Image (cartoon, helix red, strand yellow):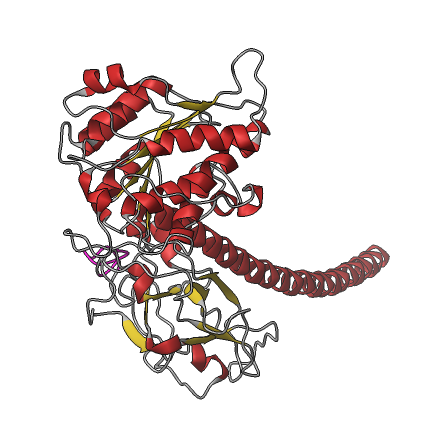
Amino acid sequence: MQIGKAMNRKSLQIDLQRGGEDGFSLIAMALTISVCGLFIVAGIQLYQMWDANHRETVTEQGIRDIQAGLSRYLAQNGRYPCPAPLDAAIDTPSFGNEVSADCTAGAFPGTFRAAGRDGRMVRTGAVPVRTLGLDDRLMFDGHKKRFIYAVTEEYASSAAQPAADRGAIAIIDADGNNGTAVPGNIAQIVYSMGLDNNGAYNTNGLLLRACDPAAASGENCDFTANATFRNTIAKSMNENTMFVHKMAYAPARTVITCADTGIPVPGEVAFLVDTSGSMDWKGQGEDGFSVQCPATMPNCKRIHVAQWAMRRAVPARIMTNALAAEPGATGMTGFVARNNVNNVQQNLGDITIDDPTQAGYEPPTEEELSNTLEGKLQGMCPTGNTPLGIHIEALADKIGDGTPERPNKVVVISDGVSNNGTDPAAVARSIARKYPNIQVDIIDIVGNPSLRTVAETTGGQYFPTSNPDELLEALFAAVGVCGATLTPVAPADPRYCGE
């Protein structure tokens, strides 16, 4: 009996001990769950913060990439692209493709039109990523909604190249104040609807919510009411007062300078001035195009505009080139032969105006440079056909290949198509294979887009403009002169060739 009692007392002690251990385990488990819950809540909050920042980063980078693509497209094509349809489903034929090469041509499904400054029309739609050669993902912002792209229609048409002040898009702030230096002077704009669904389209082109123009963000979705968009630093996360929070836009210009695009200063440059018979025309020529005269040369011929521009661009090129670590030669010629490349090469002679690579080189004085330049311009008188192709090929062979950092350039100033000798497009393909570091820039003084392919094939730039000031800016951009401040004092402008 004593033994049995002792065993019962021992069992009771063991049971009590186990009960105490079980009780401690439950408390520890509860504490552990509570601590884990705190970590989970904190983790969710951290993830939400990361996700919000990530969406903003994706949106900001997307807008930068799109604007860079638009700048390249403008430099290469002389116009902005028309928008793509906002409602085109993914991987349908119209997805990411501009609706037309002429944005002024009328109504296009999935895009919207509104009158902007001075009644000029603005078209709104999606970013034409495939036309721009961009990744399809740049159609969407970080919130999985389609970026909005609006463009002044005149700037998205190869048929009508506007002057530099024809932008029609207006930017206002939260209180309706004008948000740019010149009211309504914006050429194009790209923006994100952010978290707001007001008038926004999802990734597959479905309208999430019809635009409410009375909402704070309504200014950015009433695409047919006006060409005004709202941008403000007074951001809000309240759906009733939400503002579009990511936006980038470009002022109205028809040409891009080297400072805008990072175009390197070229090594050797050979200017080719079209001296065919059509360059002798005044006013509207037989081809239906016309060119504006500089203020110093009223009632001018086309050749006079080219000579006017060369008097300013060549000295600026030489002065800038002299500052480069590895300067290259500068030359200029008109048409010197009409049969084939061999004839042109034999008759080119010395086209050099300045060559810092020569031993004992001393920079020319302004007077020396002016005399040399005028001597060459006097001999550039219009006559005959337009043998552009064979001259471009001969000049490419003369200057040879450049480097990726400093490509050599043939800069053509012309008013039309080649009608003698080799097709310039075929020449461009040959140059691209033979001289990967030669670019052919086309300065089209009447806005005739026929030579655009030549520039595109060689990686050069195409500038269509009939405005003398824009033509000069195009020349500056072609030879890497970032601004007219390097141009010497404006020269006199004598007229040659029978006047």
Vertical placement of 233 versus 324: above or below? below
- Could you tell whether 172 is left or right of 211 in the image? right
- Could you tell whether 250 is left or right of 325 in the image? left
Taking the magenta stretch, the answer to whether it contains residue 285 is no
Q: In this view of the protein, which residue sits in the foreground, 328 or 496? A: 496
Direction bottom: furthest residue: 214
Image spot of residue 70 (x, y percent) = 39, 52
Direction top: furthest residue: 359
Residue 483 visible here? no
> What residue is at 22 percent from the left and 32 percent from the top?
388
Quadrant in the picture for the C terminus: top left
Image spot of residue 363 (x, y percent) = 58, 24
Quadrant in the picture for the N terminus: bottom right
- Could you tell whether 105 is left or right of 145 in the image? left
Q: In this view of the protein, which residue sits in the foreground, 301 or 216? A: 301
Vertical placement of 200 versus 379: above or below? below
Q: In this view of the protein, which residue sits in the foreground, 226 or 272? A: 272
**Labels in figure, total:** 0
Assign the magenta stretch its main secondary structure: loop
> What residue is at 40 percent from the left and 85 percent from the top?
212
Vertical placement of 309 versus 57: above or below? above
Residue 144 is drawn in which quadrant?
bottom left
Q: Which residues are magenta?
A: 90-99
Vertical placement of 29 versus 447: above or below? below
> What residue is at 20 percent from the left and 33 percent from the top?
425
Image spot of residue 60 (x, y percent) = 52, 57
Residue 258 visible here? yes
> What residue is at 21 percent from the left and 25 percent from the top?
390
Q: In this view of the protein, which residue sits in the foreground, 437 or 372? A: 372
- Could you tell whether 480 is left or right of 347 in the image? right
Taking the magenta stretch, the answer to whether it contains residue 94 is yes
Image spot of residue 299 (x, y percent) = 31, 55
